[in-house]
Amino acid sequence: MARPKKPKPARIPQGLPDRETLLKFIRESGETDKAAIARAFGLKGGDRRALREMLSTLQEDGTLGRRGRRGFSEAGALPEVGVADVVERDPDGDLLVRLTRGEDAPLVPLSPGGDVRGPAPGLGDRVLVRFVRLETGDFEARLIKRLGQSAHRILGVIRKIRREIRVEPVDRRSKDSLILPDGEDVRDGDLVLAQVEPHGPRYGPKRGKLLEIVGREDDPRAYSLIAIHAHGIPVGFSEAAEAEAEAAQPPTLAGREDLREIPLITIDPMDARDHDDAVYAHPDDDPKNPGGWVCWVAIADVAAYVRPGSELDRIARDKGNSVYFPDRVEPMLPERLSNGLCSLREGENRACLAVRMVFGADGRKRSHRFVRGLMRSAAKLAYEQAQAAIDGQPDDKSGPLLEPVLRPLWAAYACLKKGRDARSPLAIASAERRIHIDEMGRIDSILPRAALQAHSLIEEFMIQANVCAAETLEQKKTPLIYRVHDQPSQEKVQALVDFLSTLGLPWTKGEAPRTERFNRLLDETRDGPHADIVNEVVLRTQMQAHYSTENIGHYGLNLAKYAHFTSPIRRYADLIVHRALVSTLGLGSDGLSDFDISQMKGTAEIITFAERRAMAAERDATDRYVAAFLADRVGAEFEGRITGVTRFGLFVRLAETGADGLVPVSRLGGEFFVHDDRTHALVGERSGARWPLGMTVRVRLEEATPITGGLLFEMLSDPAPPDASMPRPRLGVRGRGDRRPPSGRPPGIRTGRKKKMGGKKR
């Protein structure tokens, strides 16, 4: 399906721009890169070289700053939205904020206005703000959301050394410890929150004040607790919210269509506690649609219980989503709702918002309609259970459902798959692992998660329901939060093309980066020696999906209209979409409020931030659990694959557990190594031996640090031989084999780790 066209920008005069024209373009772009500038001004050949020199001059004189590896922005420019700390007041008493990215960021006044609920921010708070350039040219920060205390709070472990009490931070990126002058009540190994004293000594370690003892470092369940505190994940619910949840009553038929005779079933992970979607399908009996199918997707009607302006709504918006750790869940809604009245339990009446979709024999949707109904789940099945039944191994639960429910579902999916294949969404492979926690909170196994057809079936049903929600609301011109995913930038595509050329893989110059082109590349290399590395580089070429009130389509799914509708128990975005459907279709009085509508853009920014915060916390907790799992295997040897190449070393992912760790460049041999970012390899400056991305290697585990999640490896394999066709890079980084590795934790940088686009998380 064609993606919606973006409005054409004002025409830019072609040819090499002068200094002021170039700065004006960069200022209006916010941030950009050389490739984008060259395209905008139609520059080629010598003009591109002249542009590069102009940009270098502007950088050297401080007019331009860097954004990322290749991006540029005007010095002092600020992003549209950012996380900032409230650091001081001006002479008039107004608050000033500074971006958390560094001390060189400018101070910006915080606007006192804004229709934001909750307490006003104060000194020491961390806030999500929108930066607006005023007519004077100065910036103003407008509050989107209070995020809690600022980075001056440190989560760390108590270390008592002689008479000194120190707080060692658990964040691998932090190198500074705090001295606690008053720490009589703490024990060695306590996990604590401490506040940096603002007026401590000018030299030496910073001094801190103990705020809270949150646990013990040797508690197996401490690792998710560390992630929760380190990333500021909101925990628990207020008494008012709990009271609202407890007051909720089971649904009735009032204002609802009776769907209880439809044998809808839930299919979820084996350990799922909440069930927010149910499915059913049957052949279409309309003679005008031969070979067609009718598919039902019923979703828990969370909007009936979480009303606009309620305490439950305020907390759900603040949380943004549920956060899933190996040993626990921090839910968006209280258990009374998330695991009770809003969970589509087997055999119990539940309120739902359902969509009935009709598909032709070619897999293309012909029509759909939404209903607010009362349903009763006919069965709760696990993915593995449903798949086993289809594969000829039904059990007592799935056996009676095989002919009336499961086979029609699979036949409908076969039909929908025709439309999916014609649409050609991105088909990047991603290996998922399932971490199993025992009763003591320790990992007892890390196993690959099987890719079942049952997963694909539920994913496609959910995608189609999400499309229906977006189409309905856009057609009715209702305010909407889209789930959007932009196409790869020209710079990223060019980097991919340069890399493919080193493997002898063609990509026509100027060829559009369509999803079917990426899929063809992946198919052509799937069974060859470069399959893993091509898959990895194609993944890194993609942008990150987010929420927005402006529709740019969903590139990865190759859809023009897409919104999240199917998981309102665990995502606030879906709850807003439900309310919009209720309002638009006249399904009740509990639809969008004036606040929902006025703050739609701010809500999109809040939940995008919350999603990325949750992803980071989940990843960090998993890293710590995996490090603890491997801690008693220090000295063991493992097979792995190079998944990241940096100037300071190689990141290796173990085949057995999927764990990521670092091989420092100092352990790669007795010569200098060059980081060749074009071929994603470290190259020996003298020998030309190579450590390329995707190479299979054998490593020895040297260190495993559970409190930080760090793994350090020793390389046992030999490098790949020199490639005569590759030009030698010029600049090298030291990689002497006789140097000892750096002491302490390995650097906390992760590469090649993006949010998976599979399943119900799209």
Image (cartoon, rainbow, N blue to C red):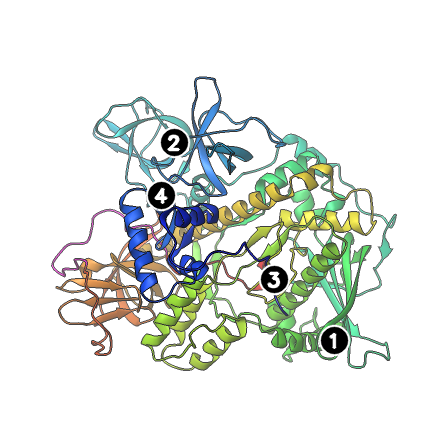
Q: Name the residue under label 4.
A: 171
Q: Mark 3 points at which residue?
A: 5
Q: What x and y, as percent, mark residue 154?
A: 38, 34
The disc at residue 152 is 2
Magenta span covers which residues?
Answer: 733-750
CB within 8 Å, label 3 to label 1: no
The mark nearer the N terminus, 3 or 4, is 3
Residue type at the position of mark 3: Lys
Magenta stretch holds residue 490: no
- Per the image, label 3 sits on a secondary structure element best described as loop
Q: Nearer the viewer, mark 4 or mark 2?
A: 2
For residue 120, which quarter of the picture? Answer: top right
* Residue pictured at 64% horizontal, 31% vertical: 239
Write down the residue under mark 1.
Answer: 408
Comes first in the chain, label 4 or label 2: 2
Q: Please provide percent x and percent y for residue 667.
A: 19, 61
> How many C-alpha atoms fall within 10 Å of the one at disc 2: few (<14), some, or many (≥20)?
some
